[in-house]
Amino acid sequence: MMTKNMLNTQFSKYIYKSVFTFFLSLLIINCSDDDSQNENNDTGSNPDLEDIDFTSATTATDKQGNTYEVGFNQVSDINQDPFVRKKNLSGETLWYIEHEKSEVDGRTTLIFIDNNDIPWVVFTVVGGSNNASYITSQAIEDNAFSGVYQTNYGTGGGSKVSIIARLNPDTGKIQKATYVIAKRNDGKTNGLVVKELGIRDKKIAVLAESAAWPPGTGTSYLKFPEITDADRVNGVFKMYYQIHPKLNEIISAEILRN
């Protein structure tokens, strides 16, 4: 038969074990919450990008053997106009478009063809324009810059920003496009350049560098959270983004540490 002291001892052990289990459960829940909060805006180590076939190429060939070429024409000492050219298997030009012919400097810097033979290109522009031959008006389909992450250059000076665009393979016109920019402390537009493009899990995968504060996730510009100048690598912020194929949202954003 158990004595009163023995019963008290067992009861104390039971209480201690219950309290320990309760606090351990709280700790696990809190850790899980922290992980979910950092999923979209990662400030930790570099992500694993080895499975993404990134490209910075200026030429690409589709499944039918058609060849795309991108670049720019030097129209003056201080002005460039971006172009995209498509040729068939025999080398004949199917279409050629200069996508911007305003006073603003513009270039086409790379091309990527997805699994559906759709060409994606990156333009850079230095400044904005209301000219009718500007990139938002020059060779576009209806609503190409509507309902996207960022519809225009924004407010600011002459920094180089990027435009990610999906082209109509039959005409070369822009079907959908969004600006991607950084911002200064005063909120004005500053430089962001897309260096490489690819596809991951049906999303547009982007490697970019910015001189000022890069964006985080969202459907419009929001400064990447908790970022400081200490996060720069060789003077710039190096970023990895996943962008919705409709170009209406940055789904994930991560700082690259090297």
Image (cartoon, grey):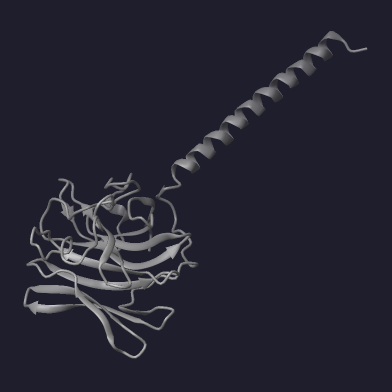
Q: Could you say which quadrant of the image residue 176 lies in? A: bottom left
Residue 201 vertical placement versus 117 (above, below): above
Q: Quadrant location of the N terminus? A: top right
Viewer-closest of 119 and 163? 119
Viewer-closest of 15 and 93? 93
Q: Is residue 19 left or right of residue 4?
A: left
Viewer-closest of 95 and 199? 95
**What residue occupies the far right of the structure in this picture?**
1
Viewer-closest of 232 and 60? 60
**Position in image of residue 177 (x %, y %):** 27, 59
Residue 43 vertical placement versus 137 (above, below): above
**Position in image of residue 175 (x %, y %):** 29, 62
Q: Could you say which quadrant of the image residue 166 lies in? A: bottom left
**What residue occupies the far bottom of the structure in this picture?**
90
Q: Could you say which quadrant of the image residue 124 lies in? A: bottom left
Residue drawn at (43%, 64%) of the image: 199
**What residue occupies the far top of the structure in this picture?**
4
Count of all numbered marks drawn on residues in the image: 0
Residue 102 vertical placement versus 17 (above, below): below
Q: Is residue 121 left or right of residue 23?
A: left
Residue 185 vertical placement versus 204 (above, below): above
Residue drawn at (33%, 55%) of the image: 247
**Position in image of residue 41 (x %, y %):** 39, 48
Q: Is residue 125 left or right of residue 195?
A: left
Residue drawn at (46%, 62%) of the image: 200
**Position in image of residue 218 (x %, y %):** 34, 46
Q: Is residue 5 left or right of residue 38?
A: right
